[in-house]
Each structure stands twice: as structure tokens, then as C-alpha cells.
Amino acid sequence: MIEEGQKAPDISLQLPDESTAKLSSYKGKPLVLYFYPKDDTPGCTKEAIGFTELAGKFAKAGARIVGVSKDPPAKHRKFTDKYDLQVELATDADGTVTEAFGVWVEKNMYGRKYMGIQRATFLIDAEGKVAKVWPKVKVAGHAEDVLEAVKALG
């Protein structure tokens, strides 16, 4: 997993409109890049809504928020519309983004092992360095913690 102080990899993100954006295109402002397993599941929905509820405060602090999962762009659009989400969602269909950040991990549920996205958040500063990492996110209160870290960047 990428650590604090490292330069964020300049990977490409596939956006819901099916265009792509390089991570470096977000430079100049703080970026909250959060990884989550799947659209429209209970924990992932609560996390996206948590960031949405604070979206105005993140914007006031100059930060953008991008959530990343393997869900296709059409599913992201449906998820965004269903909950009126105010965060950008990106698709990592081929796994390059999750691999680059080290969040594609082996998971274990009810004794069954499988590969999946570890819920994690990276705060990337205006220069493209990772300022803070939350490696195993607990959804309750997470968006508030991230907002405080964004504010601390000044």
C-alpha cells in the first residue's frame, strides 16, 4: 500500500461519462481518493452519503473527492442518481488503480478467500504527494475525519 509522503502514482481514472482523467489533472488542490468494494451496498452507500453530506465543506476547503471501485460507469451513474451523490466516482475495470495503490487484497468471508478492494482512503496534497492514509476504513465518522485532515493541510 502506498504510504504517507510518497508521490501518488499518475494513473488514469475512468469517469462515469466514460472519459478518462489522469490523477495529475487533479493537481493544485487536495484530492480525497477513496476506494470501496461495490456500488449500492450498505457500507459503500453510507460512505458515499457521508462524503456527500460534507461535500460543500470539502469544496470550501478546496478539496475534490473521488471514489474508486471496479463497477462499470453505467452502474456508477445509477448509484449517483439513486442517492444524489455529490462525489465523483471512477471505474478501475482492469485493476491498475487498485494495484497501484495496494488496495487489491485477499479477503476472507465465512472461510472463503477471494480478492477484492480494501476500503481505504488517501488524501493527496496539492503537489501530488500522499499526505494521509486511512488503510482500513470504518465508515462511521470517516468523512468527518478526512475533512479535518483536509483542513489541517491549510
Image: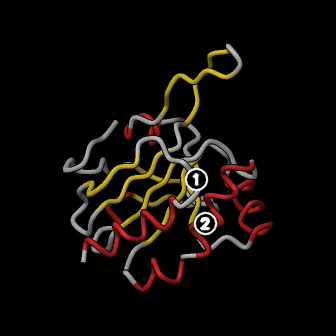
Residue at x 78% of width, y 61% of height: 78
Front-most of residues 116 and 91: 116
Q: CA distance from mark 1 to mark 2?
A: 8 Å
Q: Position of residue 111 (x, y in %)?
A: 67, 13
**Callout 2 secondary element:** helix
**Left or right: where does residue 58 sit relative to residue 128?**
right
Q: Is residue 130 above or below residue 114?
A: below
Q: Which mark is residue 122?
A: none
Front-most of residues 59 and 9: 59
Q: Position of residue 29 (x, y in %)?
A: 32, 74
Q: Mark 2, residues whose alpha carbon is within 10 Å: few (<14), some, or many (≥20)? A: some
Front-most of residues 51 and 23: 51
The reply to whether discs 1 and 2 touch (Cβ–Cβ < 8 Å) is: yes
Q: What amino acid is labelled 2 in the image?
A: Gly
Residue at x 26% of width, y 57% of height: 131
Residue at x 74% of width, y 48% of height: 41
Front-most of residues 24 and 51: 51
Q: Quadrant of residue 33?
A: bottom left
**Callout 1 secondary element:** loop
Where does the N terminus fall, quadrant-wise? Answer: top left
Disc 1 or 2, which lies upstream in sequence? Answer: 2
Q: How many dots with numbers?
A: 2
Q: Mark 1, residues whose alpha carbon is within 10 Å: few (<14), some, or many (≥20)? A: some
Residue tagged 1: 139
Residue tagged 2: 50
**Left or right: where does residue 61 sit relative to residue 109?**
left
Q: What amino acid is labelled 1 in the image?
A: Val
Where does the C terminus fall, quadrant-wise? Answer: bottom left
